[in-house]
Image (cartoon, rainbow, N blue to C red):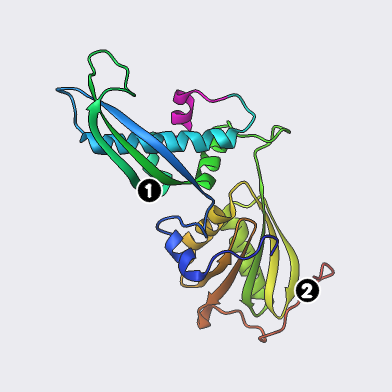
Amino acid sequence: MRRGRAACLAGLLGALGVASPGAAELRRVEAVGAVGLAEEGWTTPPREAAIGRALKDALARVAQEELGDLEPAEPEALEAALGGDPYVYASRFRIVEDRGERRALLIDEPGIEREYVVVVEAWVDADRVRERLAAAGMLEEPSGEPRRSRIQVSVRNVRSHGDFLAIRGALIERTGALSVTPLEIQRGEAVFEVISERSAARTLDALLAASGPELRIVPIEQDEESMVLRMERRPDEAPESEPGVFDTPGQNRY
């Protein structure tokens, strides 16, 4: 693997519900959230609202880092691209300091004399941020084309040509890959190069989400540029071919 193998199976399975460092690129950000306290009109408790403000600030900072040398995006443009719920991007967070209610220092609005302030440490899913920015047309390479991921996918337990076709088809049809190229085929394992506009973590998520009883994909290891999987097929779904025989008919043989 080009950058080392970063995660175990337990971490990958956990990432299907909540992202983890082994499954996605997480950015640690410390942000301050402050909300003004008015006598009326509050539908959300001030502490919760302050946490939401802090997470929005953390998300905006990661988004601006992704934009790099491009012009800083207006808050309205970022919210339109990313949506209004920062919790979607926060893998996890914790309150570093609950400063509570105090005289307004950070909020400068007419009629606001008190504010509620928290300091939050958040881990923001940068992969998801990149995807949303790219989908909104805000994130482009200097060439003007969206960023692409080059992912090496190693699949174990590939016992026949039928297995090879099944896993290659799954990579093409279920992940939205731009291309899937076989790099190496040997007894029990096939290696592909996948070109995608999705990150490795999101490619894996799409593949696992589409996994069914007839073709089950089990993640073993994954990092930013590679993944190792094992395929499992039901006995009655396995192609009729001798185990260990791996060949491609015709002149275009691998």
- Element assignment for label 1: strand
Residue corresponding to mark 1: 93
Q: Nearer the viewer, residue 95 or 5?
A: 95
Dominant secondary structure (helix, strand or loop) of the stretch shown in magenta: helix
Eyeballing the image, is 57 above or below 216? above
Residue sitting at 54 percent across and 32 percent down? Answer: 64
Q: Position of residue 107 (x, y in %)?
A: 32, 22
Q: Nearer the viewer, residue 81 or 232?
A: 81
Q: Amino acid at mark 1?
A: Phe
Q: Are marks 2 and 1 in contact (CB under 8 Å)?
A: no
Residue sitting at 65 percent across and 80 percent down? Answer: 159
Eyeballing the image, is 193 above or below 124? below
Residue corresponding to mark 2: 249
Give the position of the C terminus as an image quadrant: bottom right
Res. 50 image quadrant: top left
- As drawn, the residue found furthest toward the bottom would be 242
Which class describes the residues within 10 Å of circle 2: few (<14), some (14-19), or many (20+)? few
Q: Which residues are magenta?
A: 72-83
Identify the mark at residue 80; answer none if there is no mark: none
Res. 252 image quadrant: bottom right
Q: CA distance from mark 2 to mark 1?
A: 54 Å
